[in-house]
Image (cartoon, rainbow, N blue to C red):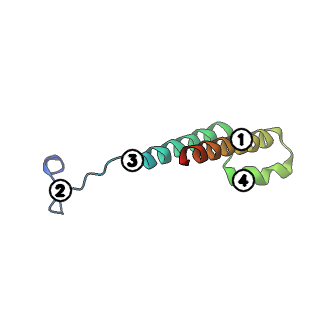
């Protein structure tokens, strides 16, 4: 453990990466994806396929997913100029 605190184990130096805006968006998106999957029990691809079953849960999930995609798309377009 001492070697981890003092410096690199194999290389001559350590590269420290800074978190950028893109990284924050990626982490946020992955978090929302995981929470949505955990709460609903649907992954986006199978949720679309499950629409054939006609269950209310699949329609609610896909509707919410499409609404969220629209909101993010509009916010991104506005931020880009």
Residue at 30% x, 51% y is 17
Residue of label 3:
20
Residue of label 1:
67
Q: Position of residue 36 (x, y in %)?
A: 63, 40
Q: Position of residue 5 (x, y in %)?
A: 16, 46
Which of the 4 quarters of the picture holds residue 14?
bottom left
First in sequence: mark 3 vs mark 1:
3
SS for callout 1: helix
Q: Position of residue 75 (x, y in %)?
A: 60, 42
Crowd around label 1: few <14 · some 14–19 · many ≥20 (10 Å): few
Residue of label 2:
8
Residue of label 4:
46
Residue at 76% x, 42% y is 63
Query: Could you tell me how far apart the alpha carbons at marks 4 and 2 are, in whole angstroms?
Result: 43 Å
Query: Could you tell me how far apart the alpha carbons at marks 3 and 1 are, in whole angstroms?
Result: 27 Å
Farthest-out residue, front: 81
Query: Could you tell me how far apart the alpha carbons at marks 3 and 4 are, in whole angstroms?
Result: 32 Å
State which mark lies toward you, 1 or 4: 1
Circles 4, 2 touching at the beta carbon (< 8 Å): no
Query: Could you tell me how far apart the alpha carbons at marks 2 and 3 are, in whole angstroms?
Result: 24 Å
Q: Position of residue 43 (x, y in %)?
A: 66, 49
Farthest-out residue, top: 39
Query: Could you tell me how far apart the alpha carbons at marks 1 and 4 are, in whole angstroms?
Result: 18 Å
Residue at 26% x, 51% y is 16
First in sequence: mark 2 vs mark 3:
2
First in sequence: mark 4 vs mark 2:
2
First in sequence: mark 1 vs mark 2:
2
């Amino acid at each position: 453990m001492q070697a981890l605190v003092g410096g690199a184990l194999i290389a001559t130096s350590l590269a420290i990466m800074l978190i950028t805006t893109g990284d924050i968006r990626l982490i946020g998106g992955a978090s929302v994806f995981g929470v949505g999957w955990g709460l609903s029990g649907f992954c986006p691809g199978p949720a679309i396929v499950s629409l054939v079953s006609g269950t209310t849960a699949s329609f609610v999930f896909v509707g919410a997913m499409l609404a969220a995609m629209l909101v993010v798309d509009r916010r991104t377009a506005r931020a880009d100029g």
